[in-house]
Amino acid sequence: MPADAASFDVSWSMAHIADTAPRPTVVALVGADSDGLLTGLADVPALVALSLREAEPAVAAHLVASASTPYVIHDADPLEHVAAAWVELYEERATLGTLEIEVDTLLSLFASGEAVMPDYYVVAGPEAIEDTWRHWWLGALAHHAPSRVLPVEASGSALRARLRALPASRPWPEPSSWLPQVHFAIPDRVGLRDETGAS
């Protein structure tokens, strides 16, 4: 089973902390149902897999921040509510005001350390994700750090291979520099990532 706790120190992004303590690389697993994929990583050395999808952001951040392994992979997406509001906006099921509230709330959580931006997003089974959500993961989000949003086949072997070969790239820009403008990322106008990486 995936672990539900671990041990070290992070803020919203590992790349933006200036102390000398070693920090793990943090990966958020999104897309296909993550339970089986996380369970399949239980025997991977130097990695802890955390099932945190139902946890409050502050609880998830605390558990990630307590990890002592070089790699942490979990299923608690700090952008979940912003993503849902963006999807609902472009599906005409929510207002711009709803999205703005979710963005402001999340930026407050990032600022207080109660939410942690992962180093990478791994999007499992992108071909099966509904269109607007696929535009969020591989378009609106990936636009800001293309090599940090990685499509992968929804299988244990593909996930392991992807984790063994995480690309080096520039870190995420600070969330406050792009989240307030995320409503300008219009589906079909922010190009989807090439999904050949999913195979």
Image (cartoon, rainbow, N blue to C red):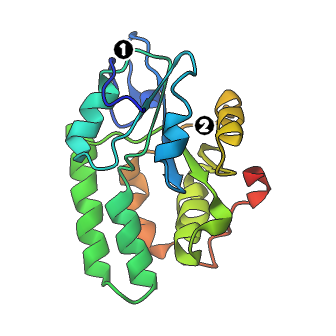
Instruction: Tell whether label 1 touches label 2 (CB within 8 Å).
Output: no
Q: List the residue tagged with mark 2.
A: 170
* Rendering coords of residue 166 (x, y %): 66, 33
Amino acid type at circle 2 is Arg
Q: Would residue 138 be seen by someone viewing this image from the given angle?
A: yes
Q: Nearer the viewer, residue 188 or 58?
A: 58
User: Does dot 1 land on a helix, a strand or a loop?
Assistant: loop
Residue 31 coordinates in the image, percent (x, y): 53, 57
Farthest bottom residue in view: 92
Q: Position of residue 80 (x, y in %)?
A: 37, 59
Between 57 and 96, the one nearer to me in the picture? 57
State the mark number for residue 94: none
- Residue 189 to residue 147: above or below: below
Q: Using the numbered discs, state the Cα–Cα distance from disc 2 to disc 1 in whole angstroms.
A: 19 Å
Residue at 34% from the left image edge and 39% from the top image edge: 116
Position of 68 relative to 177 (above/below):
above
The residue labelled by disc 1 is: 19
Q: Where is residue 82, by image quadrant?
A: bottom left
Q: Disc 1 marks which amino acid?
A: Asp
Q: Which of 199 and 137 is in front in this view?
A: 199
Residue in the picture at 36% in, 20% down:
67
| Left or right relative to 124: residue 73 | left
Instruction: Using a 10 Å C-alpha cutoff, classify the residue at mark 2 as few (fewer than 14 neighbours), some (14 to 19) or many (20 or more).
Output: few
Q: In which quarter of the image is residue 182?
A: bottom left
Query: Tag 2's secondary structure?
Result: loop
Asked whether, in this view, residue 142 is left or right of residue 111, the answer is right
